[in-house]
Image: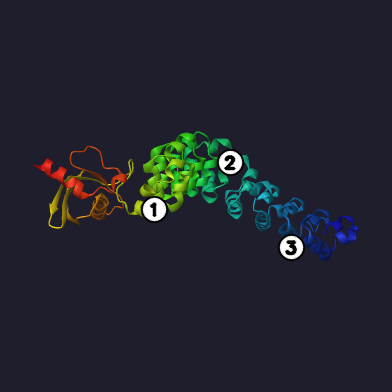
Amino acid sequence: GAALQHAAAELRRDRGIVSEAVRSDGFALEYAAANLRGDRAVVLEAVRRTEFALMFAAAKLRRDRTVVFEAVKRNPFGCGFEFAAVELRGDCAVVLEAVRLSCTCPAALRFVTEELKSDRDFVLQAVQISSEALCFLPPEWKGDRAVAQAAVRHNGFALQHASAELRGDRDVVLEAVRSDGAALQHASAEMRGDRDVVLEVVRSDGAALQHAAMDLRRDCDVVLEAVRNKEDALWYAAAELHDDDRAFHVDRARQNGIAGRGVYAPLFSITAVTPTHGGFQVSAIAAISGEGVPDMSFGCGANLADVAAALGAHASSRRVHMVLPGRAAPVSAFDDWWLLHDIAPTTMADAS
């Protein structure tokens, strides 16, 4: 193909020879006669070999959508779009299609007209097509809250291209981690140390614990929620928690229905734990509504985890908070092993 530059003018006008040359090397289009650089079939063959061949095409073909899209498809970075006619680089529909064709890295956005770059509707559409679009947009859009939220809602990893201010914005960060928990790594240090944010993330993506601040990686309740979601999340916890098999054993963590501190879950007040023949009867009310719960019966070896499971079934919730008589705060998720046998006497004494 490259040998075409040394060929006689007559050969560079020969359609068959030029077609064969560009089929071998798209750059050979540079040395083709002018009429062949305006031949649609020849140019299509060239841009299918290299997107940069578009720069040698006749002006009419650089305005041809099919030819331009072939050049964009040839390179995942959308570089061929640089050589498209200016009217196409300013056409919203054409540019958005170019972004779709190279959505993993829509560098085509670098070459759009300034007028289009300043169009909010266009920008909002672009960031919802490609998670990388925000990377190639002007700085003012990286700091635009609505644009950033639209981008991270489509793909949480777009958070890495948002402004520093927005990477520390709770609402934007929450949108990102709800889309992909691993996006937490791109949030500000403040957000990675925000207990409420991290709790929400690890409940749906335990592996995101690795991106949380160290203080939260040694927070037992946060680690428990991560382990409940992902078995090996414990490896991302602080080293001192790695050997606590009793508290963080996967089966126990998942079966334990007591919600951790700060986790949103229904709240119940245990009003009585009464010994019965062969076990215990537990009475409870929903703490917010005051609605009573049907009395629950348990065997002699029952513990608080069993009560939490029964209350969770009643409330259609995997986790619940429980407050025992005489206590102001809910029991810890790590108190799941407490036996009803040890609670009943206190409860009965309080009732008398």
CA gap, disc 1 and disc 3: 62 Å
The amino acid marked with disc number 3 is: Ala
Disc 3, SS: helix
Image-quadrant location for residue 301: bottom left
- Dot placed on the residue nearer the N-terminal end, 1 or 3: 3
Residue 116 visible in the current orientation? no
| Residue 346 percent location from the top left of the image | 16, 42
**Residue mark closest to the camera, 1 vs 3:** 1
Query: Disc 1 designates what residue?
Result: 250
The image quadrant where one finds the N terminus is bottom right
Query: Disc 3 designates what residue?
Result: 41
Image-quadrant location for residue 65: bottom right
Other-residue count near label 2 (Cα within 10 Å), few / some / many at <14 / 14–19 / ≥20: many
Front-most of 1 and 95? 1
Classify residue 184 as left or right of residue 38.
left
The amino acid marked with disc number 2 is: Leu
